[in-house]
């Protein structure tokens, strides 16, 4: 257990390859209204899921170093690809507590999954088998299928979440699983909750696991345990992207009804 420390007023850092991590930000903001939050979206280099492990680890190191300049007290890696391949990098650089999205998502899925779990994610996340490893740590017998869906992220970032072509792509990837006797689907990418309703239409009999709320709950208990919980005065939210803040603001409102205000730009 980490020692309790001063610095409860310091912000929480949340980062993702782009806009998808805002699903986690929204859940954290609702769960922890007093906390200060700095959100970084690496919109210049999205998507991460088609890039090499070495590149993803490099990006994670750069972002962790950048968030350190804000004296963050905790980092939430709101990106499944980084959570799969570079958590050690973020921890080594930041020297503050760090959580990803995989462990909370798996714990949520295992509460109800009895027959089998389907994990959908980016190519990099699926190839890492990070979800499979975490699931098997908790339940060695449950059946698992992993399915990469590499077009989901760029289509969401392009603002196509509500277009008819989005439904066609989801159907192409996921319809074969509709007849399988598996009961849960883990959304192994924080962009995927933005098309959750469409995924549910294709897989109506399966429970869709979105780890955002679980991450927010887990973060609350970790902050409390480590004496870092901020309990007074409404917290501020700061947003930084590496490219195209106007598009980021537009999609944040269209997809999540988030009014993000002023957005800073930082390029590596």
Image: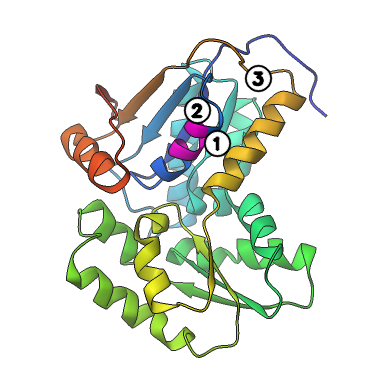
Main SS of the magenta part reads helix
Locate residue 88 relative to residue 253 in the image: left or right: right
Q: Secondary structure at mark 2?
A: strand
What's the residue at 49%, 39% (across, down)?
27
List x then y, in percent, for residue 67. Answer: 47, 24
In the image, which is nearer the foreground, mark 2 or mark 3? 3
Q: Is residue 137 visible?
A: yes
**Looking at the image, is 84 positioned above or below residue 262?**
below
Query: Relative to residue 253, is residue 225 drawn left or right?
Result: right
Span colored in magenta: 25-30
Q: Is residue 110 magenta?
A: no
Residue nearest the observer in this picture, 231 or 126: 231
Dividing the picture into quarters, in which one does residue 199 lie?
bottom left
Q: Secondary structure at mark 1?
A: strand
Question: Which mark identifies residue 13?
Answer: 2
Give how far across and how far down residue 108 sits, in percent.
65, 57
The quarter of the rendered structure image containing the C terminus is top left
What residue is at 65 percent from the left and 31 percent from the top? 220
Query: In this rendering, would 214 be left or right of 250?
Result: right
Q: Which mark is residue 229?
A: 3
Extreme residue in the right direction: 1
Q: Name the disc covering residue 76, or none.
A: 1
Q: Which of pointers 2 and 3 lies earlier in the amino acid sequence? A: 2
Q: Residues within 10 Å of mark 3 (few under 14, many from 20)?
A: many
* Residue at x 24%, y 21% (from the top left corner): 262
Which quadrant: the N terminus? Answer: top right
Q: Residues within 10 Å of mark 1 (few under 14, many from 20)?
A: many
Q: Is label 3 or label 1 in front?
A: 3
């Amino acid at each position: 257990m980490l020692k309790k420390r001063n610095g409860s007023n310091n912000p929480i850092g949340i980062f993702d390859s782009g806009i998808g991590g805002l699903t986690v930000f929204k859940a954290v903001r609702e769960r922890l209204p007093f906390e200060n939050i700095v959100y970084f979206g690496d919109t210049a280099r999205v998507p991460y899921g088609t890039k090499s492990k070495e590149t993803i680890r490099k990006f994670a190191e750069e972002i962790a170093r950048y968030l350190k300049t804000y004296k963050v007290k905790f980092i939430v890696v709101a990106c499944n690809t980084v959570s799969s391949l570079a958590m050690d990098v973020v921890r080594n650089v930041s020297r503050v507590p760090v959580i990803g999205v995989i462990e909370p998502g798996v714990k949520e899925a295992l509460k109800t999954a009895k027959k089998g779990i389907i994990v959908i994610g980016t190519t990099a996340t699926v190839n890492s088998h990070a979800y499979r490893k975490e699931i098997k740590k908790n339940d060695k017998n449950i059946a698992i299928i992993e399915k990469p869906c590499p077009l989901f992220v760029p289509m969401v970032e392009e603002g196509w979440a509500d277009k008819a072509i989005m439904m066609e792509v989801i159907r192409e990837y996921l319809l074969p699983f509709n007849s399988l006797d598996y009961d849960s689907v883990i959304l192994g990418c924080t962009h995927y909750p933005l098309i959750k309703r469409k995924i549910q239409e294709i897989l109506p009999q399966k429970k869709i696991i979105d780890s955002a709320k679980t991450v927010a709950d887990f973060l609350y208990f970790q902050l409390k345990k480590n004496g870092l919980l901020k309990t007074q005065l409404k917290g501020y939210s700061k947003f930084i992207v590496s490219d195209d803040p106007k598009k980021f603001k537009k999609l944040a409102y269209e997809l999540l009804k988030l009014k993000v205000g002023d957005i800073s730009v930082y390029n590596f």
